[in-house]
Image (cartoon, grey):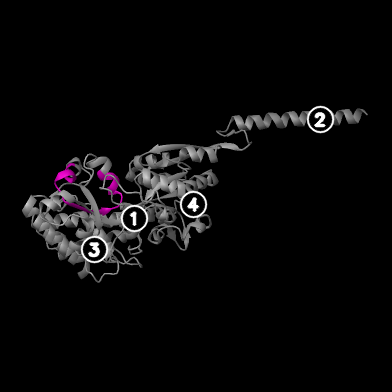
Amino acid sequence: MKRKIILLVLLALMLIISACSGDGSKSTSNQRTNGEGREKVKIIVWVWDSAKTALDLNMEAFEKEYPHIEVEYQINGTDDVFNKFLVASTSGDAVPDVIAVQSSQLSRLVEVGSLLDITDRVEPYRDKMNAFKWPDTEKDGRIYAMPWDSGPVVMFYRKDIFEQAGLPSEPHEVGELIQTFEDYYEAAKIIKEKTGVYMYSDSQTASNNRFFETIMWQRGLWYFDEEGNVTLNTPEVVEIGEYLKKFMEEGLVYDAEPWSDSWLNGLKDNVATIVGASWFDGVLSGQVAPDYAGKWAVAKMPKWSLDDPYSSANDGGSNMAINKNSKYPEEAWAFVEFMLGRAESQLNMTVDGGLFASYEPIYEDERFQQPSEYFGGQDIRSIFAEAVTEIYPQSYTANFPMANQIMTNAFAKVFLNNVSVEQAFAEAEQEIKDKLIQ
């Protein structure tokens, strides 16, 4: 009997110690338990401001489905998000858990091994996303990011300026008038002569090369081939450089550094067109000229040649990825999947958030096809959706940021120092090769 009492006392003591130990463990962690008994965890998401604005549209629904996941957003500029994460992840930092990353920078993060392998998780979405988005997410057959939004290139144009120049102004008419980039050049001369307005804006000293790169992409050209060889100084690429030089020499370009105040102000009244990505919808309606509803319209991007198989290009776009060092990969994936793998979430961010989803199932939805009041009642998203199917499937590549910066200097030589395009591109190609072996 005495032995049984002793055993019962020992058992009670063990239960008390266990309970105390459990409480102590929880008190030293940042986790709490919700009413359903699931541990409450906090994930940290690094995004830029406009991306958070879109994500906020889905947060109420996310919190209802995942009450145990607390999301803390930390806001930085697009380049800062990339640069800070590159340092943090390579040093083993578990913060952030989720990162938004531009397509032009994604390959670099994939290359250095900063991201969690999500190959099996994204399998159900492989055929639902724009096909051209996947190459930047992959390495050795494994996938490290989920596509978010795309940047199909179209031609935004000022209807009123076209009318002042005596040119057709309705979208189908403009599409017939400007089918090729030679047509675009001829229209530019007429518009400048009749109205004094420039055809597009770029900088002689600080070009971001977006126009150059979109024409390259449309033609299936790039800084590098699939084997990583530098392919800049080729007759086809030099030809594009000569074309842009002609515009600058003939005074058809509004000279301003991209994204500067001068550039943004110039887009309002000093340029007739923007050959740019779908996301210029939000730039124009929300940033440049919100009071210009009905003045802008959308037509297809001109082709270099009518024989070219592709009629659009990609410019930008973004993705979501998970830090390979995250302590909460399951919760991080729940967030990514909810935001990017759900039709309702993607519709909200596309229709009300100004992003053009890479998620194709929503393209036939009535909300997606709603006319745009700002663009005079045009169904612009259906134009974007058609353009998405006409994009050459290629990767930005891990060395794109470096090549892009070198090209800025090359164009400055052409525009300011009267260096021939062929010489400037040859020097740029050699500089890229030198960087690759350093």
Q: Is residue 417 visible?
A: no
Quadrant of the rendering where the C terminus is positioned: bottom left
Of mark 2 and mark 1, the one earlier in the sequence is 2
2 and 3 marks in contact (CB < 8 Å): no
Point out the frontmost of discs 2 and 4.
4
Is residue 299 depicted above or below 61 in this figure? Answer: below
Of mark 4 and mark 3, the one earlier in the sequence is 4
Q: Residues within 10 Å of mark 4 (few under 14, many from 20)?
A: some
Q: Which mark is residue 10?
A: 2
Q: Which mark is residue 429?
A: 3
Q: CA distance from mark 1 to mark 3?
A: 38 Å
Which quadrant holds residue 407?
bottom left
Q: Which residue is mark 4?
A: 116
The residue stretch that appears in magenta: 265-284
Q: How far across and how far down the image is residue 332, in percent?
A: 50, 45
Q: Which residue is mark 1?
A: 382
Quadrant of the rendering where the N terminus is positioned: top right
Badge 1 amino acid: Ser
Q: Which mark is residue 238?
A: none
Point out the frontmost of discs 1 and 3.
1
Q: Residues within 10 Å of mark 3 (few under 14, many from 20)?
A: many
Q: Is residue 379 magenta?
A: no
2 and 4 marks in contact (CB < 8 Å): no
- Please give the name of the residue rendered at 65% of the width and 29% of the height, measured from the top-left corner: 23
Q: CA distance from mark 2 to mark 4?
A: 47 Å
